[in-house]
Amino acid sequence: MEPLRTTDPSLINFREKFELRGKVILISGACGLIGRAFCEAAAQFGAHVVLADVKEAAPVNAAASLEEKHGTKMLGVPVDAGSRTDVNRLLQETLQAFGKVDGLVTAHQNKSHLKFEPFESVSDENWDTVVHINLKGTFLLCQVIGTHMANHGGGSIINLPSTYSVVAPNQHLYSGTSLGCPAAYSASKGGIDALSRYLASYWASKRVRVNMITPHGVWNNHEAQFEQNFARFSPMARLSYNHEVAGAMVYLLSDASSYVTGDNMLVEGGWTVW
Ligand SMILES: NC(=O)c1ccc[n+]([C@@H]2O[C@H](COP(=O)([O-])OP(=O)(O)OC[C@H]3O[C@@H](n4cnc5c(N)ncnc54)[C@H](O)[C@@H]3O)[C@@H](O)[C@H]2O)c1
């Protein structure tokens, strides 16, 4: 929708701008820690949510629960984000159910970054898996879903890189824990950052806005030592919660951010500020 050509803010309903009512929002990794918060927040703002996740995560069941709670039609689709066939099917099922798609949020990830694997011994197979799911999966979703939006009046895409594509991991963070962050994760996330900026420019004229949200240290019953270490290095001295990431998603999907594209919204408690 064209923004109102006015200098009179009293003509604007700012609250309305944050609404997602009637919008169809597709979220990959929908059943994950952050994906679940994204789905709930989008549903609370009135969206029809398409929950895309691998079959084992049971996206169909999650969609049924969300639909029952909010009384709004939802859709769950088992999808491997790294498969072009699956991503094409995801678009077809979304269009069959709703006839359109207004927003795409890519919040899937390969989990292997949670296990500590020294750089010196990373296998080709592990490198390829992380890069394939994280980066190629984001590419496929952007290409298939984004192209549809570009050809049908526009939309909003949000990709999720990482603090570790903005800065390097502080290795002291993992001291005394079993955790770590492998290079493949950082590299795949750096690719997502570059891809997002590229597409923000490429599709600006098609009214597809492309932005990023960078979460950091989202609490998920971490080891106590990790939580203590994290507090030492964080300006806010604590981990974040998945629901604290979701406000940025609502803003970037909604008309409230109609002049924002190519941005990386850091929801990282000031981690990179010092
Ligand atoms: N949690 C954090 O602290 C944090 C920090 C920075 C960035 N991120 C990024 O935010 C996003 C969400 O993170 P999270 O903590 O919710 O992760 P998560 O591991 O809890 O959830 C990821 C979801 O992706 C799904 N998934 C895995 N492989 C898939 C595939 N091939 N196709 C489709 N879905 C697949 C999983 O089933 C899972 O539901 C990720 O991109 C992650 O890199 C998270």
Image: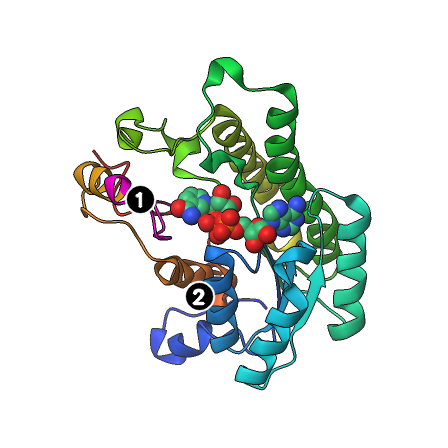
Element type at mark 1: loop
Give the percent coordinates (x, y) of residue 140: 71, 43
Task: Reply above or below: 62 against 174.
Answer: below
**Residue 221 in magenta stretch:** yes
In this picture, which residue range is highlighted in magenta? 212-226
Element type at mark 2: helix
Q: Quadrant of the C terminus?
A: top left
Residue located 50% across and 63% down the image: 36
Give the percent coordinates (x, y) of residue 51: 63, 64
Q: Is residue 218 visible?
A: yes
Identity, as a three-letter code, of the amino acid under mark 2: Ala
Q: Label 1: how many residues lie within 10 Å, few (<14), some (14-19) or many (20+)?
A: few
Mark pair 2, 1: CA separation: 38 Å
Q: Earlier in the sequence, mark 2 or mark 1?
A: 1
**Residue 158 in magenta stretch:** no
Q: Label 2: how many residues lie within 10 Å, few (<14), some (14-19) or many (20+)?
A: some
- Depth check, front residue: 125 or 6: 125
- Depth check, front residue: 260 or 159: 159
Q: Is residue 211 left or right of residue 98?
A: left
Q: Badge 2 is on which residue?
A: 256
Give the percent coordinates (x, y) of residue 207: 62, 55
Q: Badge 1 is on which residue?
A: 223
Residue located 24% across and 37% down the image: 273
Give the percent coordinates (x, y) of residue 250: 45, 65
Q: Is residue 126 left or right of residue 178?
A: right
Q: Quadrant of the N terminus?
A: bottom right
